[in-house]
Amino acid sequence: MPQPTFMRLKILLPFGIFAEKNDVSRIVAETREGSFGLLPHRLDCVAALTPGILIYENEAEGEIYVAVDEGSLVKTGPDVFVSVRNAIEGKDLGLLRETVEQEFLNFNEREQIVRSVMAKMESGFIRRFAEFHHE
């Protein structure tokens, strides 16, 4: 059976498809054990990804960097599926780093607001429950 010469990469987010690329010649991903590379002829595998930079390369675009959150990578034949919570793409690592820092700052601010609202809701629920319990 002939070895595949390219891979098909699909990066999935919880709300949709972030990227779908054909003719990918190599992929580099990060796990807790460190970075590892995928070539088209590599055996099928599954890996738990850590937040970091995923790199892929194809002839049309060259080397592309994608900042990803934690997730998973599954390679089956020529198909590679990456499922993560967040992803940001860029061709320049410096600009990508700035964009990621800004996105995470915005995310942290939103997360703090949500936590504050949840804490108020929980304390209100506990207060009403205590009042109900005393009646």
Image (cartoon, rainbow, N blue to C red):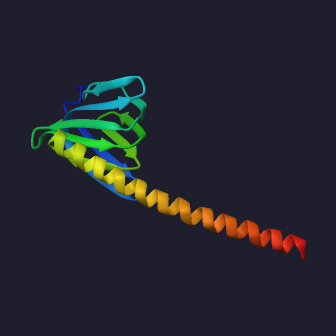
> Whole-percent x and y of residue 126?
74, 66
How many numbered marks have been drawn onto this rendered protein structure? 0
Q: Looking at the rendering, in which quadrant would you find the N terminus?
A: top left
Q: Quadrant of residue 32?
A: top left
> Whole-percent x and y of residue 56?
22, 37
Task: Give above or below for 132 relative to 34.
Answer: below
> Whole-percent x and y of residue 122?
67, 64
Question: Is residue 14 visible to the viewer in this orientation of the structure?
Answer: no
Left of 43 or right of it: where is 95?
left
Q: Nearer the viewer, residue 82 or 54?
A: 54
Q: Quadrant of residue 69?
A: top left
Q: Quadrant of residue 46?
A: top left
Furthest-right residue in this view: 135
Residue at the image position 79 percent from the left and 69 percent from the top: 129
Q: Nearer the viewer, residue 27 or 51?
A: 51
Furthest-bottom residue in this view: 135
Residue at the image position 35 percent from the left and 52 percent from the top: 105
Question: Is residue 62 visible to the viewer in this orientation of the structure?
Answer: yes
> Whole-percent x and y of residue 113?
48, 63
Q: Looking at the rendering, in which quadrant would you find the C terminus?
A: bottom right
Task: Give above or below for 131 relative to 14.
Answer: below
Q: Nearer the viewer, residue 40 or 1?
A: 40
Residue at the image position 24 percent from the left and 26 percent from the top: 3
Residue at the image position 28 percent from the left and 37 percent from the top: 54
